[in-house]
Image (tube, rainbow, N blue to C red):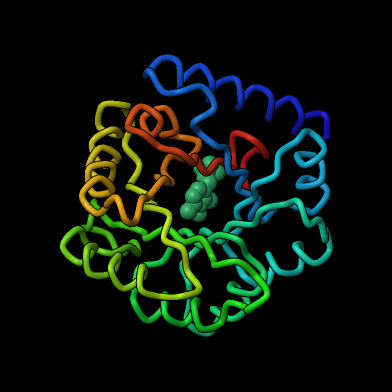
Amino acid sequence: MENIAESLELLLGRIRLTEQKYGRNPGSVKLLAVSKTRIVNDIRAARACGQLDFGENYVQEAVNKILEINDPRLIWHFIGPVQSNKTRQIASHFHWVHGVDRVKIARRLSDARPQHLPPLNICIQVNISNETSKSGVSPEELPQLAAACRGLPNLRLRGLMTLPEPWPDIEQQRIPFRKVRMMLDSITSSEYPLDTLSMGTTNDMEAAIAEGATIVRIGTALFGERT
Ligand SMILES: *Cc1c(COP(=O)(O)O)cnc(C)c1O
């Protein structure tokens, strides 16, 4: 557990230094600890050091852990692909969903959001390197999907999420993140401000922060390699 405390401190230090390096406001980048495949005790160890936001990809695994940990201060983010037969569970147990890429999914999440809970925060996933089968909406389809999400009563559109293909160097990594930042600007309006760019993982966190990420989603650098 000491390991996790140490890695968390190093990681937060790295985030703060990167904010400084690229002229970002101190504290403007939030760490989302990606805890998929990790045991409950690892999540508790990070929690004990003050980490509150956790990201999960697999619904059943996540719901089991959320119920077992049962800590009302934790903020759970669903970051995996959303299947339509899982929307009820996701809408009931999570605070955020980062991978919304179809109107049908957005509508189902809104319909399934329990009335005693505040609107579900969502990010639309965009696909800017569209050669692979990765999920995400194309830049052309984004304005329409954003408008549809804004019209749904139990969702609160917060911004965009992306998971570009891995590039070895920071200059290449910055290109897709810059495109997504410009896409966020293009759909932001004064009646409906957007405040979230969910981008950057262990390998491309610096590039994402340089281009305006407000949430970085980090697993490996915090908890170690996944097996
Ligand atoms: C697993 C995952 C991450 C974390 O990746 P690391 O390389 O372990 O930091 C971030 N975002 C998504 C969508 C993921 O599935």
Residue 8, percent from left and from top: 68, 30
Q: Which residue lies furthest to the left in this view?
A: 140
Residue 7, percent from left and from top: 68, 28
Is 149 placed left or right of 94 in the picture?
left
Residue drawn where x is 40% and y is 37% of the image:
213
Residue drawn where x is 28% and y is 68% of the image:
147
Is 45 placed left or right of 158 in the picture?
right
Q: In which quarter of the image is the N terminus?
A: top right
Whether residue 19 appears in this view of the structure is yes
Residue drawn where x is 47% and y is 82% of the image:
108
The one of 29 and 64 positioned closer to us in this rendering: 29
Which quadrant of the view contains residue 90? Answer: bottom right
Whether residue 227 appears in this view of the structure is no
| Above or below for 181 versus 85 | above
The one of 153 and 18 positioned closer to us in this rendering: 153
Residue 140, percent from left and from top: 15, 62
Q: Residue furthest front?
A: 191
| Above or below for 80 versus 223 | below
